[in-house]
Structure formats: C-alpha cells, structure tokens
C-alpha cells in the first residue's frame, strides 16, 4: 500500500515532515509522496529521515493553476500534482516555485485587509504564525475558528474564504498549460488532483474538460482519492486508458485540517492505492525521457 498525496506543516497540513514519516511507518506504507502546495520544503526535510528509516519517499508538489475552458466564464481553478519519483526537480523549477510563493504572500496581505473591511479583527502576523513559510487560506480559516468568528473550518470557507465568499481575494496563479509544461521540463509527471472536483461528476462537462486539459499537456490523473467513490475511480481509470494518462492516487492527508482523512486509507477506509501505481509512474517517466 502506498500514498502519493499528503501535506505537511510546510504548506497547509498540521503534521510536521518528521512526524509524517513516522505516521507513514506506523501505517505500514511502502512509499509516501509529499505534495505540499507550492513548496518542496516538506519533502526536503523528510527525505533524510525517511531514508534512515527505510521508507521510500517520493518528491511531489501540488500547484494551484488557472484554466480557461470554452463556454465557461473566467478561468477555473485546477489543482495539478507534479511527481519526481527518482530525484528532485531541476533547479530552475525550484526558482519558479519561489516566484509562486511571493505571489501567495502578496495575496495574504490583501486577504487580511479584505477581512478587516468585513469587520474581522485580524493581523497577518498571527495567521503567519500558523502557516510558517507558506501561509494560505486554511491558516486563515484556523485563525477565524480560534477567534470565534466561525464554529468550523468549513464555515470559515463558506462565509469568508471560498471563491464565492465575500472575503475571497484572488492571487496570481500560473496557467494550467504553463504549470504542466514546467513540471515536464523539470523532469516530472503532471497529474490532475482530485478530478471529482473539476466538474462535480457532470456526465457531459467532466469528459469535455478533461479532454481540454489533456490537450493542454496533462500527463496523469489521480484515480484513487479520499473523495472518490468506487464508481468515480472506475470512471477516471477509463479516462486514463482513453488518453494514455498515468494513474496516481493518494489520501490528500492534511492532519487535523481534515480529521476524517487518514494516511494510506483515506476516509473510513475507502482508499487503497496499489504499489503498481508507483511502478507505472516510474515507467512512464522513463518513457517520457527517451
């Protein structure tokens, strides 16, 4: 059993890289992928610890991108995973990530200002203490919960932070095609994260959007995920076969942010990613490099 989608305190998770390694060992995972948002810091910290403990650690990333779809207003937000299973990405990719992190910091300043306009007493320094080097909306949500403005993390997003909420502030995000190209040029494989969120299982819209993303350079699809039913997984496996996409999968573990989602087994045991997924990911990468 493996898990190729997890987050640490270096992005929006609540478990440190070191503790995540220990959790993976307790879960008896054969391999763990760390896919923090916009940063490789969690992987970098965990790698020597995992090596010392005999855990196979996979370098990954999760990027927030924007994609323009025909017939839909504006640009939709699409999360894209990137995997570098044999080694870390090229130095140019790490430099590009620094640019993304700077845009995130700029958005946080504007988000704090917007929340104050809505009557929320908030200081960015307090939120940054939760998010450390990569503060994001989940940290704002935790702060709103701690201050008593909301009763749950979900309420914080619904009332203030979601894209349709009054407190939402957009940040500069790379285009989908650019992000997929950056991953490919850096020696990795891109994969569509939690595709069930792309079109809400719409039987007409979903296949059309996935086809467009493939045309933009998508190389893989996350078939196995904690949000996916068996029927979802079967449908995404069908897309993988239709378009020759690499299959990936993982729990999307965040710790206390998603307390119902467990490393390796997902939500109420609904996840099991076979070892063969990683083997095929490596084989696909070798094919791309030829």
Image (cartoon, helix red, strand yellow):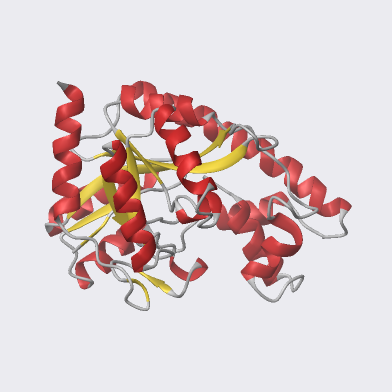
| Residue at x 45%, y 75% (from the top left corner) | 260
- Residue 240 appears at what percent x and percent y? 29, 44
- The residue closer to the viewer here, 129 or 216, is 216
- The residue closer to the viewer here, 238 or 13, is 238
Specify whether 132 is left or right of 159: left
On the rendered image, what quadrant is the N terminus found in? bottom left
| Residue at x 32%, y 64% (from the top left corner) | 19
- The residue closer to the viewer here, 97 or 277, is 277
- Residue 61 appears at what percent x and percent y? 38, 42
Q: Tell me if residue 224 can be seen.
A: no
- Residue 85 appears at what percent x and percent y? 21, 40
| Residue at x 74%, y 74% (from the top left corner) | 148
- Residue 223 appears at what percent x and percent y? 33, 54
The part of the image, by quadrant, that contains residue 273 is: bottom left
The part of the image, by quadrant, that contains residue 52 is: bottom left
| Residue at x 16%, y 39% (from the top left corner) | 282
Q: Is residue 198 above or below residue 24?
A: above
On the rendered image, what quadrant is the C terminus found in? top left
- The residue closer to the viewer here, 55 or 215, is 215
Q: Tell me if residue 235 can be seen.
A: yes
Name of the residue lying farthest toward the front: 204
């Amino acid at each position: 059993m493996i898990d190729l989608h997890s987050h640490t305190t270096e992005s929006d998770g609540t478990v440190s890289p070191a503790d995540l390694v220990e959790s993976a060992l307790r879960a008896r995972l054969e391999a763990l992928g760390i896919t923090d948002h916009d940063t490789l810091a969690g992987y970098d910290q965990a790698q020597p610890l995992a090596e010392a403990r005999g855990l196979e650690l996979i370098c990954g990333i999760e990027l927030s991108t924007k994609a323009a779809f025909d017939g839909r207003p504006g640009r939709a937000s699409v999360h894209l995973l990137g995997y570098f299973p044999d080694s870390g990405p090229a130095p140019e990719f790490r430099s590009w990530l620094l640019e993304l992190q700077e845009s995130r910091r700029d958005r946080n300043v504007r988000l704090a200002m917007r929340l104050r306009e809505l009557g929320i007493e908030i200081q960015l320094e307090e939120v940054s203490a939760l998010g450390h080097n990569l503060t994001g909306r989940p940290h704002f949500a935790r702060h709103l919960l701690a201050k008593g403005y909301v009763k749950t993390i979900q309420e914080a997003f619904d009332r203030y932070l979601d894209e349709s909420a009054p407190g939402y502030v957009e940040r500069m995000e790379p285009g989908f095609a650019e992000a997929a190209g950056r991953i490919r040029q850096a020696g990795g494989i891109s994969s569509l994260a939690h595709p069930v969120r792309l079109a809400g299982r719409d039987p007409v819209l979903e296949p059309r959007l996935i086809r467009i993303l493939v045309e933009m350079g998508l190389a893989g699809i996350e078939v196995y995920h904690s949000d996916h039913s068996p029927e979802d997984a079967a449908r995404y496996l069908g897309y993988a076969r239709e378009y020759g996409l690499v299959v990936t999968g993982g729990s999307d573990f965040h710790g206390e942010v998603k307390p119902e989602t467990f490393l390796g087994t997902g939500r109420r045991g609904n996840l099991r990613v076979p070892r063969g997924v990683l083997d095929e990911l490596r084989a696909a990468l070798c094919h791309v490099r030829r």
